[in-house]
Amino acid sequence: MELTRPQIDFHLAEYAALKAEARDAAATAANHFRWAAVSSAAILAWLATQGADLDIPVAVFLAPAAITLLMGTLAAARLVRTRAIRDYLIQLETTLGYPVLGWEERFQKQKTLVRLLSMIGWLALLGADVYAGLTLQAYAAGDTQYETRQATTT
């Protein structure tokens, strides 16, 4: 079946709109990582300076990890949408363009590496949040072993 000029124009406009949506979704997912890291650092800094002087529930020390989980889930949702768009864009590139030259087709070969590095980054941030939160909680609770370990390592 041959496409008419209005159909081609429609699909080209659709391609441009979906490409912009995918770019915005990827940027939003990257921002979620930044927001998680900055939020975690701010909360942990406050806990490190004020936590020992206040009677704070243990759950508060894990708030950075909870924020990281929330932001990671939101980022994953955006990336799932981006993948659906990417699959359709590949189909449009194949139909309307020269299949071997499309960017989506070319980038698909790198997706495994990008996905792996993103996952490592999120897991590292989550692990750091949990470790720092539990360490600060132990310090705030007056864990003498923690203070002894710190004194021997410095």
Image: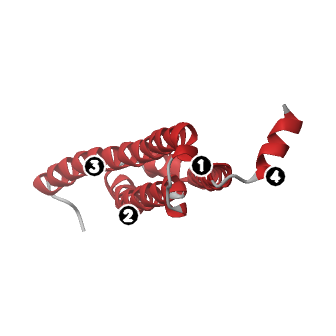
Q: Amino acid at mark 2?
A: Ala
Left or right: 100 in relation to 52: left
**Dot placed on the residue nearer the N-terminal end, 1 or 2:** 2
Above or below: residue 16 compared with residue 115: above
Proximity of marks 2 and 3: CB atoms separated by less than 8 Å: no
Tell me the distance, in whole angstroms, between the alpha carbons under discs 1 and 2.
Answer: 27 Å
Residue ID at (59%, 54%) = 126
SS under mark 2:
helix
Local secondary structure at mark 3 = helix
Cβ atoms at labels 1 and 2 below 8 Å apart: no
Q: Looking at the rendered structure, which numbered label has been put on residue 41? A: none
Dot 4 amino acid type = Gln
Residue on which disc 1 sits: 125
- Image marks 3 and 4: residues in contact by CB distance under 8 Å: no
Q: Residue at x 41, y 49 (%)?
A: 29
| Residue named by callout 3 | 21
Where residue 135 appears, as percent x and y from the top left, is 68, 51
Q: Residues within 10 Å of mark 2 (few under 14, many from 20)?
A: few
Instruction: Give the residue at mark 4.
Output: 145
Image disc number at residue 84: 2
